[in-house]
Image (cartoon, rainbow, N blue to C red):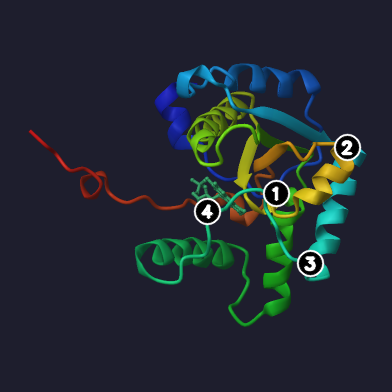
Amino acid sequence: MDLVESIHLRRSVRAFTSRPVSRDVIKEILNIARWAPSAMNTQPWEFVVATGEKLDRIRAGVVEKLKNGAAMQPDHLVVGWPMEGVYRERQVELAKRLFKAMDIPREDKEKRAWWFERGFRFFDAPVAVVIVCDKALTEAGPLLDIGAVMQNICLAALHFGLGTCIEDQGILYPEVFREHTGIPETKRLVIAIAMGYPDQDFPANLVRSEREPVDNLITWVG
Ligand SMILES: Cc1cc2nc3c(=O)[nH]c(=O)nc-3n(C[C@H](O)[C@H](O)[C@H](O)COP(=O)(O)O)c2cc1C
């Protein structure tokens, strides 16, 4: 697949088939993704790949915390819910599209809770990749590098016919991941990526998010 085509085709996939993803394919995706640039070539990323029963136990642990109303204490400051302005408008626009596709009315609290929970379940994906970073590094600096490797993972996954959804939701209860994977306190959980073969019949997977027109983004100087 052509690079430009891949960039346009990548989109968040929020439902997957049960078809397992081979370890060889996952390894190759991460092998490709690690060629991302990083400040002074520090390569501040490590990948924790959860699958199978282990991932199911993590899902169950996270959902239990969510249902009990346990405080979410991510290892780093995640993007908050903007309450006004253009960022809020874009967020609402996306939510409207997803809820419309999923036929979830505004007042249906039960269905909304179900939808919210799906993110914490890694959308029932067969694979969850968590990118972790050593706490010896500053908190903010490596995020740029990790963003680059994160996009590489999604694009490389697409090359192998896999769908992905980058998600903060997956790392909001880092203690559950630590308990099941042994990730030490010295490592920060930065972001999760749900991965698997896309369920093409799931309505939310057909939703396309919008982008600001390019002319609104550029300031020409000179
Ligand atoms: C840092 C980051 C965190 C995200 N967290 C979530 C999340 O927790 N749940 C979710 O459903 N989508 C999450 N997304 C996906 C975004 O909603 C999605 O990328 C955005 O709406 C653009 O849509 P697209 O990926 O289909 O192009 C996240 C994306 C990024 C980059």
Query: How far across and how far down the image is residue 135, in percent?
Result: 65, 36
Question: Outermost residue toward the front?
Answer: 136
Query: Who's the residue at 26% across and 44% down the image?
Result: 214
Label 3: which residue? 70
Q: Secondary structure at mark 4?
A: loop
Describe residue 33's horizontal placement relative to residue 115 as left or right.
left
Query: Who's the residue at 81% across and 32% down the image?
Result: 20
- The amino acid at mark 1 is Ile
Label 1: which residue? 171
- The amino acid at mark 4 is Val
Q: Earlier in the sequence, mark 3 or mark 1?
A: 3
Does residue 73 appear in this view? Answer: yes
Real-space CA distance between mark 4 and mark 2, rounded to the nearest whole angstrom: 28 Å
Query: How far across and how far down the image is residue 167, in percent?
Result: 63, 48
Query: Who's the residue at 57% across and 53% down the image?
Result: 78
Asked if 158 appears above or below 2 in the picture, the reply is: below
Q: Residues within 10 Å of mark 1 (few under 14, many from 20)?
A: many
- The amino acid at mark 3 is Ala
Label 2: which residue? 52
Kindly indicate whether the residue at mark 2 contacts the one at mark 3 (C-beta within 8 angstroms).
no
Real-space CA distance between mark 4 and mark 3, rounded to the nearest whole angstrom: 31 Å
Q: Earlier in the sequence, mark 4 or mark 3?
A: 3
Q: Is mark 2 within 8 Å of ligand 1?
A: no
Q: Earlier in the sequence, mark 4 or mark 1?
A: 1
Q: Earlier in the sequence, mark 4 or mark 2?
A: 2
Describe residue 114's horizontal placement relative to residue 36 as left or right.
right
Q: Is mark 3 within 8 Å of ligand 1?
A: no
Q: Is mark 4 within 8 Å of ligand 1?
A: yes
Q: Secondary structure at mark 1?
A: helix
Question: Outermost residue toward the bottom?
Answer: 107
Label 4: which residue? 207
